[in-house]
Image (cartoon, helix red, strand yellow):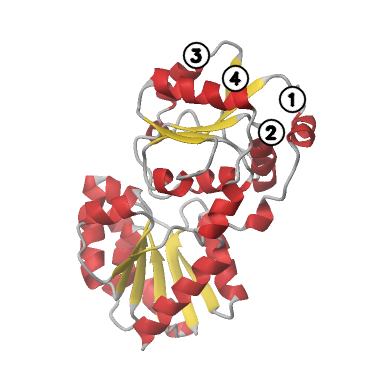
Amino acid sequence: MKVLIVASFNRQRFAPFIEEQVDALKSSGVDCEFFGIEGKGIKGYLASLAPLKKRIEEFGPDVIHAHYGLSCLLACLQRSVPVVSTYHGSDINVPKVLRFSRIAMRLSAYNIFVSVKNAQTAGLKKNYSIIPCGIDLGCFPFQSKEDARNALGWVMDEKKVLFAGAFDNAVKNSALAKEAVSLLPGVELVELKGYSRQQISTLMHAADAFLMTSFSEGSPQVVKEAMACGCPIVSVDVGDVKEVIDGVDGCYAVDRDARRIADALENVMTSGIRTTGRDRIISLGLENMKVAERLISIYQSVIG
């Protein structure tokens, strides 16, 4: 089976979770190649149509798997190869992008949403599945909290809360996170920006808690990664976070209220708990190889 992956390449690389998903597909015997889109806005994407058709002719894929709404729409403008489209959140939660995503949904052979909320917002009634992006647990090997803190130069009795992104990313709503942490004397909010995958794993093993306050999300990878590291999680009810952390001690879904967030963080730091989030990831089938199995089944049905 030959699958052409279509996605944005505007940052001169593909999103890490897409690359990792493709690695799992390749490990499962699927012949995958990438087509990267360089251009912004609908005009920028349309400029890639002729190069895409040429790449299809050269590679001869059985199916195209496109990621994000505008990439999905571009892929669907050629009609020679069936398209499986995955929508990741921003292409559903931003109204001006959603209208293009909805055109892609009608043209796609099959649609994938990473969360139930995104599917509900899209309003599609059939021909879709809910498949969150998985993670590679091998990228997050166990470290003791002490070893992780030593590697980072952190003192053991310092209180550290890891924020779910960059402070200057408006969608992540760092203002609410900072307000909540300011209610907890002696607690530092650590910005998750500019780190390698290995460093992120160490940070998540070292932190007392992981905090997400985003205005919108699809199925945030960082939450799954924090769970794989046993890091307690406090999050507003956004994307599929509430479903993913459900039933895991030391993980809280709370209202968008600084006091409630602070109380949950205080509970976590007082208890000193590490979570069984890794087991939850496995039970939900959110390992990349399990996700690859589901994708291959969809590809086969579309080709058939």
Q: Residue 154 carries which label?
A: 1
Relative to 22, say whether 153 is above or below: above
- Rendered residue at 28%/46% (across/down): 93
Q: Residue 182 carries which label?
A: 3
* Number of callouts: 4
Residue 243 pos. (x, y %):
41, 48
Relative to 71, say whether 153 is above or below: above
Going from N to C along the chain, the mark reached first, 2 or 1, is 1
Q: Do the residues labelled 1 and 4 touch (CB within 8 Å)?
A: no
Going from N to C along the chain, the mark reached first, 2 or 4, is 4
Question: Real-space Cα distance between discs 1 and 3?
Answer: 20 Å
Question: To which quarter of the image does residue 6 belong?
Answer: bottom left
Going from N to C along the chain, the mark reached first, 4 or 3, is 3
Going from N to C along the chain, the mark reached first, 2 or 3, is 3
Question: Real-space Cα distance between discs 2 and 4?
Answer: 13 Å
Question: To which quarter of the image does residue 46 belong?
Answer: bottom left
Question: Real-space Cα distance between discs 2 and 1?
Answer: 8 Å
**Residue that numbered label 4 is attached to:** 188
Amino acid type, residue under disc 2 in the picture: Ala
- SS of the residue at dot 1? loop
